[in-house]
Amino acid sequence: MKTNRKEDNIILQLKNGSSSAFRWLVNEYQDYVYSICLSILKNKMEAEEAAQDTFLKCYKSINKFNGKSKFSTWLYQIAYRTSIDFIRKRKHTQDIDDFDYAIAGTTNTVEENLEQKELQQQLANVINQLGSEERILITLFYLQEKSVKEVCAITNLNESNVKVKLYRARKKMYDIMSQTNSENNKF
């Protein structure tokens, strides 16, 4: 099993129906699960609901976890599939306007923080222009820092497919940024 001892113990407790183990699981992974759901759904309320559904599905199907992958990868796969199910259920997709990234560090000056915030907003705007599959791949690989193998396990895509789609998504982001820059330079 590719987990640490504490996770092994928690998983065993979950399989025995422990509510305290479930609370630990939610506290430990809620931010990660929510961010995956939000990056796919792009709607805060739906992401919260999908995250809750993810944890309930995890709890109900914990006996299916066989330890062939990391527990977090298995959980993220549930979050990914739950979010995709939400997309299928809704009639049309909605964009969120406030796709935020946390500003790293507190030692920056106010000007540096504002500049960093502006760059993050520009990046968020570019990511929001991608399709949902491209968004999740970029988010998982670059923002969540998942390996290609973990991305494959979460999305059920093969390794070459993930690499090609990441390449195309990066190229698309570059094209969007180039187009935006050329439009800004016209004035």
Image (cartoon, rainbow, N blue to C red):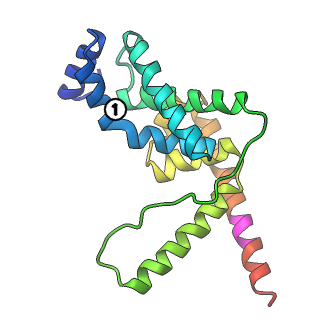
Q: Residue at x 57, y 34 (%)?
A: 159
Q: Position of residue 132 (x, y in %)?
A: 68, 43
Residue 70 visible somewhere in the drawing = no
* Amino acid bearing label 1: Val
Mark 1 falls on what kind of element? Answer: helix
Q: Is residue 135 above or below residue 108?
A: above
Residue 7 lies, with reference to residue 131, above or below; the image says above
Q: Position of residue 158 (x, y in %)?
A: 60, 30
Q: On the rendered image, what quadrant is the N terminus found in?
A: top left
Along the line of sight, the residue nearer the viewer: 132 or 93: 93
The secondary structure that dominates the magenta segment is helix
User: In the image, is 160 to the left or to the right of 172?
Assistant: left
Q: Position of residue 112 (x, y in %)?
A: 42, 82
Is 176 magenta? The answer is yes
Q: Which residue appears at 50% of the width and 53% of the height?
A: 142
**Residue 151 in picture, x, y percent from top left:** 51, 37
| Residue 94 shows in the view | yes
**Up-down: is 177 above or below 115?**
above
Q: Which residue is mark 1?
A: 26
- In which quarter of the view is residue 80 placed? top right
Query: Residue at point 24% right, 14% down?
Result: 12
Q: Which residues are magenta?
A: 174-178
Q: Is residue 55 above or below residue 61?
A: below
Q: Could you tell me which quadrant the C terminus lies in?
A: bottom right
Q: Nearer the viewer, residue 173 or 38?
A: 38
Residue at 59% from the left image edge and 38% from the top image edge: 46
